[in-house]
Amino acid sequence: MPLKLFEADEGATVRVHDTVYVEDVLTDPATVTFKYRTPEGVTVSVTPVRQSTGTYYWDMVLTEPGVWWVRYESTGNEGAEEQALICKRSQF
């Protein structure tokens, strides 16, 4: 799966989301975890919000400029995906 890239301003709230499919059908896995790593290298695990079957999200505030990494992990159907978020320094 190709790496996704997203750009936002410092201080922005961004919604990161993931969908889980089994044989082309949206499916709830046993567990879903989102992890993010700040530009300073701090890794945080969060439990995402279940929006609907197989669809999850987490709103995060980009508090510092640089590259943020987000990883989505699920168990039960074993999956993982990563996304890079580029946070630009605010001019204000």
Image: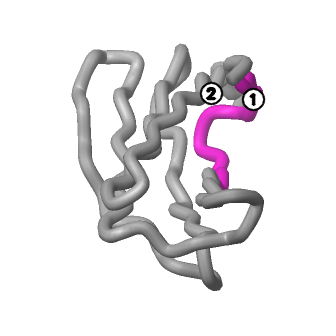
Q: Nearer the viewer, residue 6 or 2?
A: 2
Q: Nearer the viewer, residue 24 or 79?
A: 24
Above-or-below relation of 67 to 8: above
Q: Amino acid at mark 2?
A: Leu
Q: Nearer the viewer, residue 27 or 14?
A: 27
Figure disc tally: 2
Please report the residue visible at 59 percent of the width from the left and 43 percent of the height from the top.
11
Q: In the image, which residues are magenta?
A: 4-15
Which label was assigned to residue 56? none
| Disc 2 + disc 1, Cβ < 8 Å | yes
Q: Quadrant of the N terminus?
A: top right
Above-or-below relation of 61 to 80: below
Residue located farthest toward the bottom when viewing the structure as drawn: 52
Q: Quadrant of the C terminus?
A: top right
* Mark pair 2, 1: CA separation: 5 Å
64 relative position to 13: left or right: left
Label 2: how many residues lie within 10 Å, few (<14), some (14-19) or many (20+)? many
46 relative position to 34: left or right: left
Predominant secondary structure, magenta span = strand
Coloration of the structure image: one colour
Which label was assigned to residue 6? 1
Regarding mark 2 in the picture, which secondary structure is present there? strand
**For residue 83, what is the image quadrant?**
top right
Taking the magenta stretch, the answer to whether it contains residue 61 is no
Please report the residue visible at 69 percent of the width from the left and 58 percent of the height from the top.
23
Q: Which residue is mark 2?
A: 85
Looking at marks 2 and 1 on the same chain, the residue that comes earlier in the sequence is marked by 1
Please report the residue visible at 68 percent of the width from the left and 27 percent of the height from the top.
90
Please report the residue visible at 25 percent of the width from the left and 42 percent of the height from the top.
44
